[in-house]
Amino acid sequence: MRTQAPAPPRIDLRSDTFTQPTPAMREAMATAPLGDDVFGEDPTVCELEALAAETLGKEAAVLVTSGTQGNLCSLLAHCGRGDEVIMGHLGHTFLYEQGGSAALGGIHPRTVPNQDDGTLRLEDLAAAIRADDPHFPVSRLIVLENTHNRRYGSYLTPAYTDTVAAFAHEHNLKLHIDGARIFNAAVAQGVDVKELVRNADSVTFCLSKGLSAPVGSVVCGSADFIRRARRARKVLGGGMRQAGIIAAAGIVALQQMVDRLADDHANARRLATGVAAIPGFAVDLSRVQTNIVYIDVVHSDFSAADVAARLRQHEVGVFDTGPRRLRAVTHYGIEAADIEEAIQVFATVMA
Ligand code: TLP
């Protein structure tokens, strides 16, 4: 039984999911008009969904509880039982969503290699598409991830995404984007987020990561697709009642928290260069594009778990994501001074 919440590290670089809502969000949540959203009667949810659809350049949107639920609703809306979804072997949907599409939807996952920049090669995608043959499942969908969590927070460009969308459509497939951090991708490239999804059939983005809202993600796509995604959300138990209390924070997130992601990217770069200069650590600086930094522990006496534990003793939180690899994520609430302090702590634990 969980009785007492453990205290988080003071400088918490474990994930941007640890962000706290801003004062403006708390105020908006306290005063939002509410209704029963399962009946479409929550004005604040309707407002958020309209704002999200407009911001992403899609016809419609649906508020979901999490990125995991958004991706699963999308896969269930695009695919039926026995269909196949093609995705990267390091994709969040493949690795970290409990295999939900297979477990709950009977959708067969097929992986192709993620390149270091998060892309999937067209030749690998082409080789993965099934022939029309009763031995095979039916290829139905491609999933891209932008930014790519396990591939260093790399962003995908509008041109690359358009190419994959055209390829998918040529082969009668759909394209879904796991855009949990798509606003980081947009800000890092200085492009309108619409350009990153303009030819995709659907996208999930998270309100509760860098955008700092306490709960929620949004799925966007055509009106017909969103109708099916909304049905999927209901069967997954995601029909929420007075959900405007969550949506209110999401509206503030979209209106006020996008441009400041540039600060997180600057902080990530400073952290990366600072830690790269400490003997015992290695960082591929060419890969640091957004708010995620992967740090390799090259000192042979320590594992990544050892280093994470020592950092934690000094009130710095990171996740070990492999035997010799750490991940640090910058976000709202982490200031430039915190980064300088964290770099000092990295040096101390390695001394
Ligand atoms: N990622 C979390 C953890 O699951 C590891 C993190 O700390 O990075 N897509 C991507 C690309 C994600 O990074 C995540 C969460 C999700 C989907 C799932 O979102 P939630 O946690 O809201 O279900």
Image: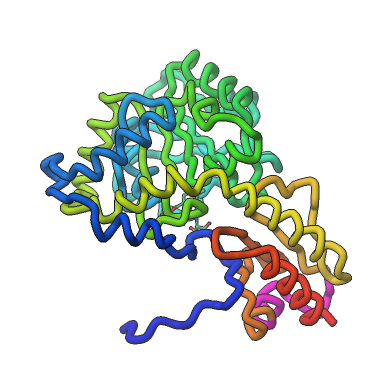
x and y, in percent, of residue 82 in the image: 33, 34
Picture layout, residue 157 above or below residue 146: above
Q: Magenta segment, which residues?
A: 299-310
Q: Is residue 42 left or right of residue 179?
A: left
Q: Is residue 327 left or right of residue 213?
A: right
Quadrant assignment for the N terminus = bottom left
Picture layout, residue 1 above or below residue 166: below
x and y, in percent, of residue 170 in the image: 49, 13
Farthest residue to the top: give it. Answer: 170
x and y, in percent, of residue 255 in the image: 43, 43
Q: Is residue 316 left or right of residue 246?
A: right
Q: Is residue 267 left or right of residue 56?
A: right
Residue 286 visible in the snapshot: yes
Along the line of sight, which residue is nearer the eye, 332 or 137? 332
Colour treatment of the image: rainbow
Q: Residue at x 63, y 30 (%)?
A: 157
Q: Residue at x 25, y 55 (%)?
A: 245
Along the line of sight, which residue is nearer the eye, 35 or 17? 35
How many numbered marks appear? 0
Along the line of sight, which residue is nearer the eye, 75 or 128? 75
307 falls in the magenta region: yes
Quadrant assignment for the C terminus = bottom right
Q: Quadrant of residue 327?
A: bottom right
Residue 101 visible in the snapshot: no
73 falls in the magenta region: no
Q: Residue at x 76, y 58 (%)?
A: 270
x and y, in percent, of residue 268 in the image: 69, 56
Q: Residue at x 48, y 63 (%)?
A: 19
